[in-house]
Image (cartoon, grey):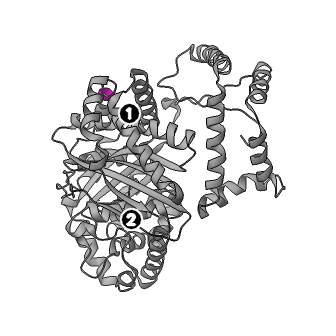
C-alpha cells in the first residue's frame, strides 16, 4: 500500500518459539492455494465493490479529504483518476498472471511485536468513568447542556495540566471522525483518561480537579460554539442523523430529547447551569469507575473506585411497538436503520443474538455491498441496554437503490431462516473472536467496556464470558434465534432519503 508493498498483518494469541517458521510455511501455501482456486466471479465481485467505494469516497467531506492526501505526495493531480481507470481495465487473467509472478519472486519479512513486561518501566494505563443519566439532568429548555458541559469540562487550566503531564483525556466524541460514537449515548456520558503508569499519583490529583472544574465565560463560550458545530454536523451526516431519528422513536419520556441538543437552547445556557449539572452528574451513585493496566495497582484502583458506586443502570423504557418513518434531506447519500427490541434476564441469552448479527453482517456485505455494489457502509449488531437489547441492521446506500436494497434485506432474512451453514457460522465467530482479542489488548477499550458491562447488568468480566461462550454456539442455537428475530415486517425502520 502506497509504497508498493503487499502486506499481511496477523494478531496472534501468543508467540511461541517456532511460530514464525510455521506461519511462513502456512502463509505461503495459503497464497498459492488462493491463486489456484480464485474464480473470475470472485474477482469481478471485489473489483465492483472497490469501484463503487471509490465513488462514495467523494461524497463524505471528511473522508474525501482524507483519501485525497494519499495522492498528493506523488504530485500528480490526475493520479486518482488513473488508478480508477487502471482498476476498470484490469481483467481476471492479467490479475492472476501478475500475482503468480509477483509472489514467486517475492520475499517475506516478518516484523513482530512481543511485550516483554520485565523490561517495561512505564506503560499505558486507562481510567474510564461512565456517568449515568446524561440527558435526564438537562433542565427543560436546556437540551444540549450535556454537550456543552463535557466540552467546557476541559477548561484552559485543565488543558494546561493535560499537556504538561502527557495525559490523554476525552470527554466527548469528535464530530470530525465519522462513526466515532461507541462511547456516545443519551443514557450515559463518559470521561476517559489514558496516562503513563508512573503518573498514577498525579492522576489522582488531576481527577479530583477535573470533577471540581471551575468554569469561566471563555470556557463556556468556546464549549457552546463547539456544541453548535457538532449539532450542525450531525444534521448533515446521514449515518448520525439516521440513528438520531431512530432513537427519537425508540426512547420514551426524557430520553427522546436530542443527544446533540437544540441550537436556541444551547445558546441560552449559562455558567450557573454548568455548576448545577455538575452537582447531579457527579453524584456518587451515577459514577461507574473502571481502571485497566498490564499491571494493576490494587490500592490505586481502590482509591479512585471509591468516588463511585459501580452499580447497574436503571432499566430503560424502550418502544417495542413498530414504527416506520422517513426523513427527507437534500443529501446524495441515504441511510436505512431497522431494529427490534428484546428483553433478557441472564447474560448468556445475549450470545446467540450477537452470533446471528455476525452472520447477517457477512451476508449483507457479500450480497448488498460486493455483488450489488449498492452500499458504502452496512452492518448488523446488538446494542445493549439494562435488561434490553436492540438487534439492528444499518445500510448506507443511494436514494435510487433504497427499494431494491430493502427487498434484498427481506430476502436475506428469509434465506437465513431457511439455511445457515456450519462453515459460515465458524467464519463469523472466529473473525469476531480475533477482533475481540485485539480489542482486549488495549487498556483504553478494556476500561470502557468493563464499565459499560457493569452499567448494563452483565458484570465487569462479560468480555471473558462472551469469548468463552460464543465459541460454544452451535447451528441449532442460531437457527432457533433466527426464527425468533428475523421477521422483516416486525422491524422498526427509519429511512434518510
Q: Which residue is mark 2?
A: 326
Under circle 2, the secondary element is strand
Q: Of callouts 2 and 1, which one flags the residue occurring earlier in the amino acid sequence?
A: 2
Q: Is residue 493 visible?
A: yes
Looking at the rendered structure, the number of numbered marks drawn on it comes to 2
Within 10 Å of disc 1 (Cα), the crowding (few <14, some 14-19, many 20+) is: few
Q: Is residue 458 left or right of residue 147?
A: left
Within 10 Å of disc 2 (Cα), the crowding (few <14, some 14-19, many 20+) is: some
Q: Residue at x 24, y 56 (%)?
A: 322
Is 160 inside the magenta-drawn segment? no
Foreground residue among 192 and 183: 183
Q: Can you give x and y, in whole percent of width and height, for residue 8 in the image?
A: 63, 30
Residue 99 occupies which quadrant of the picture?
top right
Q: Residue at x 41, y 44 (%)?
A: 409
Residue 66 occupies which quadrant of the picture?
bottom right
- Using the numbered discs, state the Cα–Cα distance from disc 2 to disc 1 in whole angstroms: 27 Å
Q: Note whether 373 is above or below 108 in the view shown.
A: below
Under circle 1, the secondary element is helix
Q: Can you give x and y, in whole percent of width and height, for residue 422 in the image?
A: 39, 21
Please tell me whether the stretch drawn in magenta is mainly helix, strand or loop: helix
Q: Which residue is mark 1?
A: 415
Q: Which residues fall within the magenta stretch?
A: 467-471
Amino acid at each position: 500500500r502506497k509504497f508498493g508493498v503487499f502486506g499481511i498483518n496477523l494478531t496472534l494469541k501468543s508467540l511461541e518459539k517456532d511460530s514464525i517458521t510455521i506461519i511462513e510455511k502456512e502463509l505461503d501455501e495459503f497464497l498459492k492455494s488462493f491463486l489456484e482456486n480464485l474464480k473470475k466471479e470472485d474477482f469481478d465481485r471485489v473489483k465492483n465493490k472497490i469501484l463503487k467505494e471509490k465513488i462514495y469516497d467523494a461524497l463524505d467531506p471528511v473522508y474525501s479529504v482524507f483519501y485525497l492526501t494519499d495522492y498528493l505526495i506523488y504530485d500528480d493531480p490526475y493520479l486518482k483518476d488513473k488508478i480508477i481507470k487502471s482498476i476498470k481495465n484490469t481483467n481476471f487473467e492479467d490479475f492472476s498472471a501478475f500475482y503468480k509472478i509477483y509472489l514467486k519472486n517475492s520475499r517475506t519479512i516478518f516484523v513482530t511485536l512481543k511485550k516483554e513486561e520485565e523490561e517495561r518501566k512505564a506503560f499505558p494505563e486507562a481510567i474510564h468513568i461512565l456517568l449515568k443519566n446524561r440527558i435526564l439532568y438537562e433542565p427543560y429548555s436546556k437540551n444540549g447542556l450535556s454537550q456543552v458541559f463535557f466540552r467546557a469540562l476541559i477548561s484552559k487550566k485543565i488543558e494546561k495540566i493535560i499537556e504538561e503531564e502527557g495525559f490523554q483525556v476525552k470527554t466527548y466524541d469528535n464530530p470530525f471522525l465519522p462513526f466515532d460514537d461507541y462511547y456516545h449515548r443519551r443514557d450515559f456520558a463518559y470521561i476517559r483518561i489514558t496516562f503513563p503508569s508512573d503518573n498514577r499519583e498525579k492522576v489522582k490529583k488531576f481527577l479530583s480537579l477535573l470533577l471540581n472544574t471551575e468554569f469561566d465565560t471563555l470556557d463556556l463560550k468556546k464549549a457552546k460554539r463547539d456544541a453548535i458545530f457538532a449539532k450542525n454536523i450531525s444534521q448533515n451526516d446521514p449515518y448520525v442523523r439516521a440513528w438520531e431519528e431512530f432513537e427519537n422513536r425508540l426512547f420514551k419520556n426524557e430520553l427522546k430529547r436530542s443527544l446533540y441538543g437544540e441550537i436556541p437552547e444551547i445558546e441560552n445556557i449559562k455558567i450557573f447551569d454548568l455548576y448545577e449539572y455538575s452537582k447531579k452528574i457527579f453524584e456518587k451513585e451515577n459514577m461507574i469507575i473502571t481502571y485497566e493496566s498490564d499491571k494493576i495497582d490494587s490500592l490505586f484502583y481502590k482509591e479512585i473506585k471509591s468516588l463511585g458506586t459501580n452499580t447497574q443502570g436503571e432499566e430503560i423504557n424502550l418502544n417495542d411497538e413498530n414504527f416506520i418513518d422517513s426523513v427527507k434531506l437534500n443529501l446524495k447519500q441515504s441511510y436505512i436503520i431497522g431494529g427490534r427490541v428484546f428483553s433478557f434476564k441472564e447474560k448468556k441469552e445475549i450470545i446467540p443474538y450477537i452470533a446471528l448479527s455476525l452472520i447477517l453482517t457477512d451476508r449483507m456485505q457479500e450480497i448488498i455491498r460486493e455483488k450489488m455494489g449498492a452500499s458504502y457502509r452496512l452492518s448488523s449488531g446488538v446494542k445493549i441496554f439494562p435488561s434490553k437489547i436492540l438487534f439492528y441492521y444499518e445500510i448506507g446506500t443511494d436514494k435510487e437503490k433504497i427499494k431494491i436494497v430493502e427487498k434484498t434485506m427481506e430476502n436475506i432474512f428469509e434465506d437465513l431462516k431457511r439455511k445457515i451453514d456450519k462453515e459460515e457460522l465458524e467464519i463469523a465467530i472466529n473473525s469476531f473472536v480475533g477482533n475481540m482479542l485485539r480489542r482486549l489488548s488495549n487498556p483504553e477499550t478494556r476500561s470502557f467496556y468493563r464499565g459499560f458491562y457493569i452499567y448494563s447488568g452483565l458484570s465487569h468480566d462479560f468480555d471473558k464470558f462472551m469469548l468463552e461462550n460464543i465459541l460454544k454456539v452451535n447451528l441449532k442455537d442460531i437457527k432457533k434465534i433466527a426464527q425468533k428475530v428475523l421477521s422483516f415486517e416486525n422491524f422498526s425502520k427509519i429511512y434518510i432519503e
